[in-house]
Image (spheres, rainbow, N blue to C red):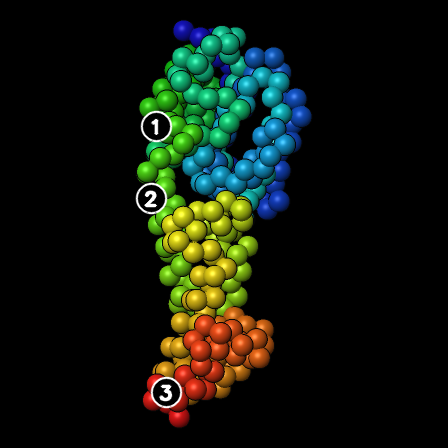
Amino acid sequence: MSDIIVFNVAHRKREINFYQADNPSGFGANMYLFVHFISPAAVTINGMEHITDSGACIIYSPGQKQEYKHYNGIFVNDFLIFKVDDPLFLAGYGLPENEIFYITNSDEITRQIENITYTITDKLVDRRNETTQHVLKMFETLSSLYVENNPGPKRMFEARQRFIALRNEMRGNPKGWTVEKMAKQVWFTRSRFTVLYSSFFNISPNADLTNIRIEYAKKLLKTTNMPITDISASCGYSGAEHFIRIFNKKVKLTPLQYRKNNGIQ
């Protein structure tokens, strides 16, 4: 059995906004850091920032730069800092090092980390052997829940459900949306969001947002007596002239002509 020493551990630890971890050389020799991101996070690996979903994990090997921070609100995580002399310890569980990976049951890992936290903080009894058993159990569980870096159909299905929910929210109220806000809503960078949105709906997010605004305007024109300036603002346009120009281009009618043709004078 590997000799494991736990130096620090916490479950569901909440950090203030703007939290950032930046350890250029990691920790000491043979010391690893496991982080389970309960909330989305921005993780930088080899100079490239990655926005994770909730439930992402990373295991930093000894000497590896550790750089991650909050993303879109309070930072919540589980973490474990431990030392193990066996350099093949993680390889035995088939777990990657220094790269983001996902698991299928986030709550179970939090529960395992909580068990380790309990035995470490109990100073009245020597629980070192029990702690080691909990750590081994956690990595066994982590291995069984590990999803390959290419998330495949399941993760794409989950992402698409978030995108559909976003689209429905925009349809209900298109005011105030930008591509940046849309991407942030579903925890992706703008570039990654644009690629996925286009693949899911066969239209770019900008073009789709315009269509959604026009459809919302049509609804208001057909069902209300709102002035054109108010409809323009409700659809997210900064000025009525811009709204009228876009509407006329898409519908081949001015808003007033469309309203007249659909029963409201």
The quarter of the rendered structure image containing the C terminus is bottom left
Amino acid type, label 1: Leu
Name the amino acid, label 2: Phe
Q: Residue at x 61, y 12 (%)?
A: 29
Query: In front of the other: label 2 or label 3?
Result: 3
Residue 264 in sight in this render:
yes
Disc 3 crowd rating (10 Å Cα; few below 14, some 14-19, many 20+) is: few
- Residue 225 is left or right of residue 19, and the answer is left
**In the image, is residue 3 above or below residue 106?**
above
> Considering depth in this image, is 53 or 233 the residue closer to the camera?
233
Closer to the N terminus: mark 1 or mark 2? Answer: 1
Residue of label 3 = 261
Q: Which three-letter amino acid code belongs to the residue tagged 3?
A: Asn
Q: CA distance from mark 2 to mark 3?
A: 41 Å
**Residue sitting at x 60%, y 21%:** 64
How far apart are the alpha carbons under marks 1 and 2?
18 Å
Whole-percent x, y for residue 32 in the image = 54, 19
Q: Is residue 7 above or below residue 182?
A: above
Residue at 53% x, 24% y: name it: 98
Residue 22 position (above or below residue 212): above
Q: Secondary structure at mark 2?
A: helix
Q: Secondary structure at mark 1?
A: helix
Residue at image location 39% in from the left, 53% down from the top: 202
Count of marks overlaid on the render = 3
Whichever of labels 1 and 3 marks the residue nearer the N terminus, that label is 1
- Is the N terminus in the top left, top right, bottom left or bottom right quadrant? top left
Q: Nearer the viewer, residue 94 or 223?
A: 223
Q: Which residue is mark 1?
A: 145
Residue identified by numbered label 2:
157
Q: State the image quarter where residue 115 is shown.
A: top left
